Image (cartoon, rainbow, N blue to C red):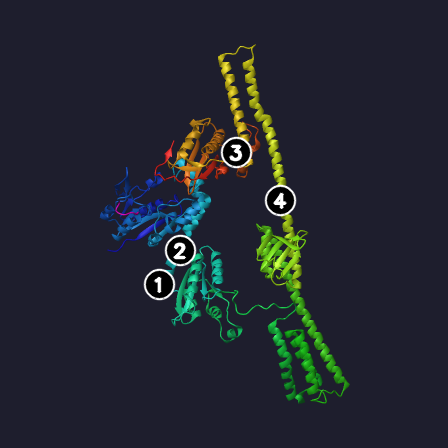
Amino acid sequence: MARGRLRIYLGAAPGVGKTVAMLSEAQRRRERGTDVVVGLVETHGRAYTAGMLDGLEVLPRIAVQHGDRLLQELDVDAVIRRHPEVALVDELAHTNAAGSSHARRWEDIDRILDAGIDVVSTVNVQHLESLNDVVREITGQRQRETVPDEVVRAADQIELVDMSPEALRRRLAHGNVYPVERVDAALSNYFRPGNLSALRELALLWVADRVDEALTRYRHDQDIDRTWATRERVLVALTGGPEQDVLLRRGARIAARGAGGRLIAVKVVPDSGLRDVSDAAVTSARTLTRELGGEMHVVTGSDIPSAILDFARSVNATQIVVGASRRHRWQAMLTPGVGEQVVAGSGDIDVLMVTHPYTSGRVRRRAPGSVGLSRTVGGWLLATAGVVLLSWLLEVTRSEHDLPLEVLLFLLLTVVTAIVGGLWPALAGAVLASLALNWFFTPPVHTLSINQPRNVVVLVVFVLVAAAVSSVVHLSVRRTAEAVAAQRSSRILADLAHSLLDAERPLSSLLDQARDIFSATGAAVVRRSRTGLGDPVVVSGEVPLGDPGATLTTAAVDDAHLLVLAGDESRADQRRLVEAFASHAAAVIRGHALSEQAASAFRLARDNRTRGALLAAVSHDLRTPLAAIKAGVSSLRERDVVLSEEDQAELLATVEESADRLDALIENLLDMSRIQTDTVTPHADEVVVEDLLHATVGTVSAPHRIRTWLPERRLTVVADAGLVERVLANLVENALRYSPGRQEVLVSGERMQDHLEVRVVDRGSGVPTEQKEGIFAPFQRYGDAPRGEGVGLGLAVARGLTEAMHGTLSAEDTPGGGLTMVLRLPLGPASTPAAEGDSS
């Protein structure tokens, strides 16, 4: 019996519609006459999903006892007995209840496939085993139910079900995914736009890898060796030498530039059986490749360049990275290196030849005005061998020319020597050419004597013209070198100015660049002292300030600081560039000093505003309850007026209410003072969250308008119970105050990895994003409106007390309108997950 075929709908996130897509396919197949049955589909109470089952045969589930509950699981035997053409089995990663025939649902599906039945299933990307840790880092929640990647990869067809983050959040807000009481928490936690975008990218990349495997199989089956640049595949050719780390990191950077890029490393071993590198080098390369997210292969071949190219075409590589040759130049002249041969045979594959510190030969520093080693050698060859060769040619053809032509030919040789080799080879060639002219071609020949005075003039003019031309050529080369150096310095200073604008630590960045530009082992900005170099302010690399024998280059930054470079003494032509770096360092130091002064001025201004706000608050908010207390007491003491018992009770209630208001205001002022002076000392203990919520509800002004929701009963936090109650009371009272009419305020708590998140949700007018932080400032009411009671310290005190307990307090928009206060506290060790939620 042939094994059935597996089709999987892979969801980028919960709620994107993978179950609906599966049911839509089932309806289409049923209409075409295919025998389709529903083995198990989870509708999660969604009416639209349940409606998609109309017309489909649904097999009964099997009941499995799990503790005190009776769970409904997939009846595998019933599916096999029914033996349809296609069976629908939802939620591939589901863990079966204890006592089921298999521990995991994917094992159930495997048995159904073995029976020759095609299966259509669903799974979300967060349930893939290889992505479990990544999903936890993104969302803060670990998925307890996972499925091995090889199970999903073995599917005959995989279809991605995707939806934009904005569309999915709208579905949640409309209640199409979760119950209403879970919508706010879901939108603000797992279903944040950033989380959904990251999950979507994970799903796309995972499916792209699966498509890539299918493409590789197709190319192999069709015997296609041309490169199809569907995505960037960078092949790094390794030799086992010390430069392999440089090549791998360069290849990884290239692969990372495009979405879905792959890094592949290959080491070709000669098929003679002899290892050309140590096993340790291969192991080191394999480890680094894996850390960079790539894969490494070791292949054999008699011809290394051909083996590299054959492997590159087999993996559909788009680029090959090879290292520059480590061989000497005379070796390269005899036979081309591996890199040159790979370039010659690469065809439509791009080849990047990377230089590295182990390239053969050292780069010689050219003196200003120098024409380079190769041109200098050529010039000396022309000045010597060229003169000899020209003299021989003129000697054997003596009857065909006379002295003026001979002088012009030697002058031409001298000019060419000056152009090629510069001043000194040209001058030497001119002297040798004049001696050759005198010896061979000026009567009497074969002697250094000159009979005719005009011949003396000819030789002198010849030497002067040769020297003048050589000087002009030499000066031109030197001016060109100076212009290039000036252009380089200007470019360095421009790049330095731009990089310092964006750097988080500009002085450190400047020193790092100074080390690179001047090839220094270290750079530092130090304080001046009477003895010379004082204490360092910022150091990059190694600067032996205390070593009297060290070679140090210094430049004045300002009256109090010096720039120090360690290493070779800088050349004279680099001195101005060193001083330019010192000037930039001075600007950075001045900017830092100005920033500190501005910060100090800002603190002083803030303290002045705080004092002014406190005076305004004391003049109004503290004076009002005092006036009410005084009026009430004065009325009660009045003997000329007889008050009824109801009037006396009302006056006493006013006095008590005003005293409570006054006590709360003073308590907030004292708390704010303790927070600003860092004298709050919480007594941290493990506290049950459920008890905290019930205690808070009992202290607020309208407990009947509060609704609490906890998905787990025995959640605990590490905090000071009294301080947490005060924080929650402040948040709840604030939410009650701004919720219109008699709308309820939802207070929910939910575990988020290693902390608890308590959300206080109101349905008021909300707060604009740019003003959310301002509502936590002391003595501030939203919009600075002079209405209501209090001095604007409630939220400031709540945040201060929260931070004292190592928690955070922030404000977010409530989906649909309003403001949600999010309180995060460290989770207690006794918190245990529960299957049922609690709502009241």
- The dot on residue 264 is none
Q: Which residue is mark 4?
A: 596
The residue that mark 1 highlights is 221
Q: In the rendered structure, which disc, 4 or 1, sits on the residue that comes first in sequence?
A: 1
| Labelled pair 2, 3 in contact (Cβ < 8 Å) | no
Badge 3: residue crowd in 10 Å (few <14, some 14–19, many ≥20): many
Q: Quadrant of the N terminus?
A: bottom left
Of the numbered discs 1 and 3, the one sitting upstream in the chain is: 1
Q: Nearer the viewer, mark 2 or mark 4?
A: 4
In the image, 280 versus 736, the foreground residue is 280
The residue wearing badge 3 is 797
Real-space Cα distance between discs 2 and 3? 52 Å
Where does the magenta region start and end? 100-104
Instruction: Give the image location of residue 661, x and y in percent.
Output: 52, 25
SS at badge 1? helix
Q: Report whether residue 763 is seen.
A: no
Q: Residue at x 54, y 70 (%)?
A: 361
Q: Is residue 344 left or right of residue 404?
A: left
Name the residue beneath numbered marker 2: 209
Determine whether the residue tagged by mark 4 lies in a helix, strand or loop: helix
- What's the amino acid at mark 3? Val
